[in-house]
């Protein structure tokens, strides 16, 4: 058997359904072996897009997504997507081709030490030096990628090893992934005693709770404590926005409605929170509020994150055990109730807005109305991301995906492809700025080729809106952030997709619903009025929490 064939069998053993990537000379044996496999190879138009697809599949499924590139420029192209998945803690395995082993000790065409190159952006990586190590390296790559906290791993596969023949019979290794252990009895009891002393606890929930499928346990804990729940960008949907204890999302600004709640808290119950999303200096710069840290790993050291007690291990099991030890509290505090009312009033106030270009708040309102509770929205990175995080409300986990670790522009379109392949029965929308869309817009051809019914909603402002926002806030002027755009409708049509344009604000919701009913990829161009950015900044700077 050829080593490449055995390698593919090891991937099959891991349950791999899709591999996203770009074929190259140094991985031709693997590509040939895939022809005899049930694994579906998705040819992408750029290696970054392949990695974004794999990371999104990993985030939604909990199983490592797989991407593939050749050596040299193929591998360097894929770094950003792999780094994104790693910092977002999504399980994924990157496979890169490599030159023959007898070339790697000297200067050689396209050859870099890829394991070393990827070392800072992966949890683990290894080169396959001989066919005898294939099963161990593949098994470890998938095991490490999935272990808490999950992330990216790398397999470097030299061309001559892939071509080599295996003369003795070999078998894939049995899968034996270990679940995270529960916290100790003492830590859970200490946490319960700490909570009992708190009069105004607030729960801060991150993506770790969703990743560990602990949303139900989170809600039960919140209801028992009558404690309000604030979500990070990546924690959106951990509790339904309709739940009376939900304060929606924190993170846009140092001061917002949700931060008013944290300011009034005498204990923050931090569940699955990751500092790479939003440093604690943003919501408690002096580290005055005591923290109960509940996560799969011990807390990062940070002067503003004052951990008093920790419960480390399986979040789902630990929350259930903790809740059992707590008495029922009567009702949510009046101040927290008023904060929630203000948040909901702001969301609904733009329902009938007719201003054109369309205000961000109106786009979000109509998008929410056009989608079902189970449908999936992916936000790219830009000014629209800040609005989506703050105002797009979720009913369920993993229905609004925001990359907020590395936060790479261009993730939404390829990510939507990964989402649609993971959940073909759900409607999927990629929300992009015109800048982010054009960074990976070539993957629209991939979506067309796969005949995927999905929508790309482009907020067009002819510029890098988020940077403009930050420049205006810092300097009251802008620097080199404007550009011209193509005709997005014609661009979509040239790829074979359907193109639509919002001409009047009143037609936005109808356009979105029509796009969502189409049997194929649709691009919707929507002009956006980003003058709302600084209006929001100025409003929040003057926000008085005494309401």
Image (cartoon, grey):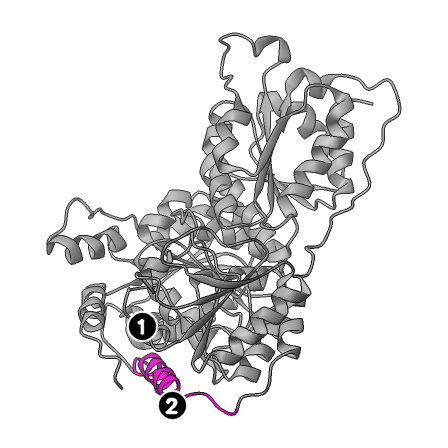
Badge 2 marks a residue whose secondary structure is helix
> Is residue 159 at least partly visible in the picture?
yes
Residue 198: where, in percent of width, then height? 46, 79
| Mark 1 to mark 2 CA distance (whole Å) | 27 Å
Queried whether the magenta region covers residue 347, the answer comes back as: yes
Q: Residue at x 33, y 71 (%)?
A: 259
Viewer-closest of 353 and 406: 406
The quadrant in which residue 138 appears is top right
Residue 373 shown left or right of residue 246 in the figure: right
The furthest residue to the bottom: 330
Could you tell whether 177 is left or right of 116 in the image? right
| Residue drawn at point x = 20 percent, y = 47 percent | 481
Residue 496 at x, y percent in the picture: 48, 49
Helix, strand or loop status at disc 1: helix
Looking at the image, which residue is at 43% across and 69% down? 512
Looking at the image, is 280 positioned above or below residue 123? below
The image position of residue 483, as x and y in percent, is: 22, 46
Would you call the spot at circle 1 few (<14 residues within 10 Å), some (14-19), or many (20 or more)?
A: many
Q: Which mark is residue 334?
A: 2
Foreground residue among 230 and 292: 292
Q: In the image, which is nearer the foreground, mark 1 or mark 2? A: 2
Q: Which mark is residue 361?
A: 1
User: Which quarter of the figure is the C terminus placed in?
Assistant: bottom left
Judge whether residue 64 can be spotted in this image.
no
Q: Position of residue 119 (x, y in %)?
A: 51, 31
Chief SS of the magenta region: helix
- Residue 403: mark: none
First to last magenta residue range: 330-350
């Amino acid at each position: 058997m050829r080593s490449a064939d055995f390698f593919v069998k090891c991937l099959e053993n891991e349950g791999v359904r899709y591999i996203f990537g770009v074929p190259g000379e140094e991985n031709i044996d693997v590509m040939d072996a895939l022809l005899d496999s049930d694994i579906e190879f998705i040819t992408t138009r750029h290696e970054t897009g392949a990695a974004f697809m794999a990371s999104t599949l990993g985030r939604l499924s909990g199983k490592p997504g797989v991407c593939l590139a050749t050596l040299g420029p193929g591998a360097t192209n894929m770094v950003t997507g792999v780094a994104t998945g790693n910092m977002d803690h999504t399980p994924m395995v990157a496979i890169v081709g490599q030159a023959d082993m007898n070339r790697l000790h000297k200067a050689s065409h396209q050859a870099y030490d890829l394991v070393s190159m990827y070392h800072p952006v992966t949890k683990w990586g290894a080169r396959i030096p001989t066919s005898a190590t294939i099963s161990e390296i593949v098994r470890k790559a998938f095991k490490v990628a999935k272990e808490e906290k999950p992330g990216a791993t790398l397999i470097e596969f030299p061309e001559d090893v892939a071509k080599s023949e295996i003369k003795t019979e070999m078998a894939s290794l049995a899968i034996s992934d270990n679940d995270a252990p529960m916290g100790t009895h003492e830590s859970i009891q200490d946490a319960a005693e700490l909570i009992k002393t708190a009069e105004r606890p607030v729960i801060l929930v991150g993506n770790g709770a969703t990743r560990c499928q602990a949303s139900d346990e989170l809600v039960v804990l919140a209801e028992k404590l009558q404690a309000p729940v604030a979500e990070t960008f990546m924690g959106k949907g951990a509790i339904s926005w309709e739940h009376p204890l939900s304060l929606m999302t924190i993170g846009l600004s140092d001061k917002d409605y949700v931060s008013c709640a944290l300011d009034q808290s005498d204990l923050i119950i931090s569940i699955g929170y990751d500092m790479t999303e939003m440093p604690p200096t943003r919501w408690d710069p002096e580290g005055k509020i005591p923290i109960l840290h509940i996560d799969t790993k011990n807390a990062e050291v940070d002067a503003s994150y004052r951990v008093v007690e920790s419960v480390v291990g399986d979040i789902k099991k630990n929350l259930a055990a903790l809740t059992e030890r707590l008495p029922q509290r009567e009702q949510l505090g009046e101040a927290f109730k008023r904060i929630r009312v203000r948040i909901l009033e702001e969301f609904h106030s733009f329902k009938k807005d007719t201003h054109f270009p369309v205000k961000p708040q109106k786009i979000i309102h109509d998008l929410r109305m056009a989608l079902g509770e189970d449908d999936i929205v992916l936000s790219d990175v830009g000014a629209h991301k800040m609005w989506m995080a703050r105002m797009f409300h979720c009913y369920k986990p993993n229905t609004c995906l925001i990359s907020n670790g590395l936060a790479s522009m261009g993730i939404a379109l390829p990510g939507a492809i990964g989402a649609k392949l993971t959940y073909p029965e759900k409607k999927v929308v990629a929300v992009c700025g015109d800048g982010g869309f054009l960074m990976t817009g070539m993957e629209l051809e991939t979506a067309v080729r796969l005949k995927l019914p999905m929508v790309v909603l482009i907020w067009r402002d002819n510029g890098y809106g988020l940077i403009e926002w930050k420049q205006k806030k810092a300097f009251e002027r802008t620097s080199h952030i404007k550009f011209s755009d193509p005709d997005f409708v014609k661009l979509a049509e040239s790829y074979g997709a359907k193109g639509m344009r919002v001409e009047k604000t009143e037609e936005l919701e109808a356009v979105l619903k029509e796009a969502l009913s189409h049997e194929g990829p649709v691009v919707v161009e929507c002009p956006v009025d980003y003058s709302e950015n600084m209006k929001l900044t100025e409003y929040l700077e003057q926000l008085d929490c005494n309401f």
